[in-house]
Amino acid sequence: MSFESPLLEIIATTVADAKLAEAGGADRLELVTAMGEGGLTPSVGLIEAVVDAVAIPVNVIVRPHSRAFVFDADDHAVMARDVNAAAAAGANGVVIGMLTPSREVDTEGLKRLIDAADGRLAITFHRAFDEARDLHEALDVLLRFDAITNVLTSGGKPSVLLAEDTIRALLRTTEGSTCTVLAGAGLTADAVAGFVARTGVRAVHFGSGVRVGGNGLAPVDREAVAKVKRLLAQR
């Protein structure tokens, strides 16, 4: 029986990060700025430069501020502009997420950005998902949107390593859909193979776990990326 290695997505914050991640074997990038604030929308210039610098897909976070995942009409308008800018800059996809004040998926805001993407971009719903009132209810809502191809989640915990049962349950819910559970937050090279084996996830997301010294504000460590890639391939 053939085995397909899980997809490896790496956060990049600079062109250098992007090149190092690709050289280490990353399958896809999530491009952000202000990683210390959980990731904000990068400049158009950075998006264009990273797209030009690498051959792997570049997904761009669209998040106008770090105050909350609850956005007003002006925020939505800014985000729609940023979605269009990301598409024009050659991005593969956008990474978005929004909640209502009652911590449910903001379906109206989501529809607006899906409309802005207009089929040009893959769409990941980011870790706003982990702040939803009910993760299973939130996933049911997201699965109504065929445009959403990934849900990035730590299973509602600070580290996805603490949420294996939840991840398995979310995976069962997505069976037969076009949406992938993208497991991230707290993953390390030492833990990833066992985590994948126990949960069955088909895509993993790394930030600090593949940066120099495990520091989220440090550069990507090419050898750490390569180590994770090898471990995933050996499963």
Image (cartoon, grey):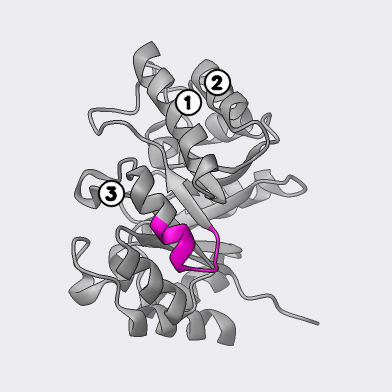
Disc 2 designates what residue?
A: 112
Residue 132: horizontal and vertical position, in percent?
A: 42, 30
Amino acid type, mark 2: Arg
Residue 26: horizontal and vertical position, in percent?
A: 48, 72
Which SS class for mark 2?
A: helix
Which SS class for mark 1?
A: helix
Amino acid type, mark 1: Ala
Q: Which residues are magenta?
A: 49-57
Residue at 47%, 37% in the rendered image: 85
Residue 58: horizontal and vertical position, in percent?
A: 50, 56
Label 1 to label 3: alpha-carbon separation: 18 Å
Residue 118: name its quadrant. top right
The foreground one among 161 and 229 is 229
- Number of other residues with Cα within 10 Å of mark 3, as a class: few under 14, some 14 to 19, many 20 or more: many
- Residue 21 is left or right of residue 143, and the answer is left
Which SS class for mark 3?
A: loop
Residue at 57%, 27% in the rendered image: 116
Residue 109: horizontal and vertical position, in percent?
A: 49, 20
Label 3 to label 2: alpha-carbon separation: 23 Å
Which residue is the extreme one toward the top? 73
Amino acid type, mark 3: Thr
- Residue 69 is left or right of residue 58, and the answer is left
Disc 3 designates what residue?
A: 33
17 magenta-colored: no
- Number of other residues with Cα within 10 Å of mark 1, as a class: few under 14, some 14 to 19, many 20 or more: many
- Residue 32 is left or right of residue 22, and the answer is left
Disc 1 designates what residue?
A: 80
Image marks 1 and 2: residues in contact by CB distance under 8 Å:
yes
